Amino acid sequence: MRLYEYQAKSLFKEYGLSVPKSILVHDLEGVRGAFASLAPPVAVKSQVLAGGRGKAGGIALVDDPSKAEHEAARIFALPIGGEKPASLLLEEGYPHEREMYLSVTLDRGERSYVAIAAAAGGVEVESMKGKVIRKVPVGGIDAGFAAEMASELKLPPGESSQFVKILLSLERLAREKECELTEINPLAVGKDGTLMPLDAKVIVDDNALFRHPEFAKLHPEDEFEGEASRQGFAFVRLDGDIAVVGNGAGLVLSTLDLVGDAGGEPACFLDLGGGAQQDRVEAAIRLVNRLPGASRILVNIYGGITRSTDVAAGIRAVISGGGLKPLYARVSGAEEEEARQMLAGTAVKMYKTAPEAVAAVVKGA
Amino acid sequence: MMLPRGGDPVIVQNMTGRYGRLHTKLMLDYGTNVAAGAAPGKGGESVEGVPVYDTVAEAVAKTKARASVCFVPAEFTLAAGVEALDAGIELLVIITEHVPIRDELKLVQLAQAKGATIIGPNCPGIIVPSEKVKLGIMPAPSFSPGKVALYSRSGTLTYEIAGELTASGHGQSVAVGIGGDPINGSTPIQWMDFVQGMEETDAVVVVGEIGGDAEERLARHIEKSGYKKPIVGYIAGRHAPKEKKMGHAGAIIYGDYGTADSKIRALTAAGVKVAKTPMDVPRLVREALG
């Protein structure tokens, strides 16, 4: 789960990291008051989860209240990565001479956490020059570890001692809150040599949320995503008109590819999970059947543990409730013939292979 | 690395749970020698005639098992894994989904220290059709004995592709689901090197998906090590959106990191024939085998 900048910064403060003074506003009415209590210049920052906010025009630096209102109105209306901000962060600007980079993140290939730092930051960590990467032990790091990184970065003594404190705090946050990523980009170096995190990016390990109930209510949930997660489905909403349902993440992913290759556009990704029974199939199809924008449904089940007859029974239960959108199904595996017979005479179109079902649903035939 | 052999005694952890029961039966039906179960507080019970003990240590002492299949819920998987490794289990198959990353890292380190192999978490397990042995949840009819090694980050895709291979006469020497999480107990490179030494294997099929850089690393390894056996690949998620977890915890693209295109490019450059669809894998295997 990725946190919004303002949420990440409040975690930073909890862990003793200084951040510029800021106020969160939820509507235009709040902008003038917030501006008045901050020292200009003030950065107006879109609170969206997508990266590349600056480039997309989601951040503006203003020095008077009417400009602040003007920019806030523009940014509230600006979707970034398909998401319009529900709030803006108004934050005191921090005049600085240099920008550094610092993160503690999971390196999947190395199967280890790593600390990454660069004395001269940049937008993309991949292309940063002179960056220093060190593996972080599962049990955490000490001041010696952080000091060695500071010396590899050739930081002057005044910056080095601040860097050590910041890295220790960031690593403790990453470890205690079980984050996949904690990142400060940029870590600004002020005119007086004070290091100040200007942005904060935190991604918490979804699988560890059961140990961190404090994160449970941080995000407003999309109605469909909320219901899918209560049902235990893996669900992602997409922009197209073909709802895609299957069993197994990889299978559904490859079904999206088949649909895309055939010129279709998926409306969602829904993975029923293994061993799906009649009631779960029924719940999944009811869910995607209500999805606005979805005009037809593609079901791709590779029966192994999942019995084809359970899938057919689930589909029949939805049909009997009425209002089922056109449904195209490929159900293979155990009891395939019986499943086919159970759906014979209904409006459901059955296919023997995934490419056949995909071709038909894309054509809408 | 170690392959299960026919007749080897195997333990099932949390045998008395819903999935533990179901798959104990299905593994026995296939031919796996499920010799004991472990479930705290359930010692003395039995499932399908197989005795259940309170601890893995007791089950190991009674059966001399070196392999375990773990169905313990995610909150307790770390403790169950530590228990198994401490009891001397050398091949630990973790089926459980949603295990926290830090728990996985701790298990990987413990396994490395003990010289044990972990498969998973969040995986269907391992099957060796010629030995009539499976440690996991894969549906038996999709698989047949043969000379193609198959490993995959996805369960159902493994079944689908194994089924396609079986239908076209290409049986499998071994099939492994390495898991859909960001951290895998054993990596594609480890399996690749392992099957290189397997006489029964003529070709390798690698099934990947978006997220991380396992396939890019594998491609570099193939080039650097001068890999000898023909390899066919398939990568799911060419049409996946960015910044969204696509079912598996590990299947997520950040920026340009973890895209299907990057993986397909890297594997292709390393000489791997990459199939566009799962259905296309058998044809490429046939061509690769000449």
Image (cartoon, rainbow, N blue to C red):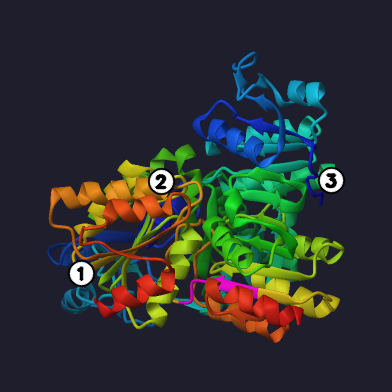
Q: Position of residue A75 (x, y in %)?
A: 24, 75
Q: In the image, which is nearer the foreground, mark 3 or mark 1?
A: 1
In the image, which residues are magenta?
B233-238
Q: Can see residue B67?
A: yes
Q: For mark 2, what is the residue?
A: A276
For the N terminus of chain A, which image quadrant? bottom left
Question: Where residue B115 is drawn, which disc sits there?
Answer: 3
Tell me: A92 left or right of B13: left
Helix, strand or loop at mark 2 = loop
Q: Amino acid at mark 3?
A: Gly
Are the residues flagged by discs 3 and 1 in contact, CB closer than 8 Å? no
Q: What's the CA distance linking mark 3 and mark 1?
A: 53 Å
In this picture, residue A49 sits left or right of residue A25: right
Quadrant of residue A58 in the image?
bottom left
Chain name for mark 2: A
| Image quarter in which the C terminus of chain A is found | bottom left
Q: Which residue is mark 1?
A: A295
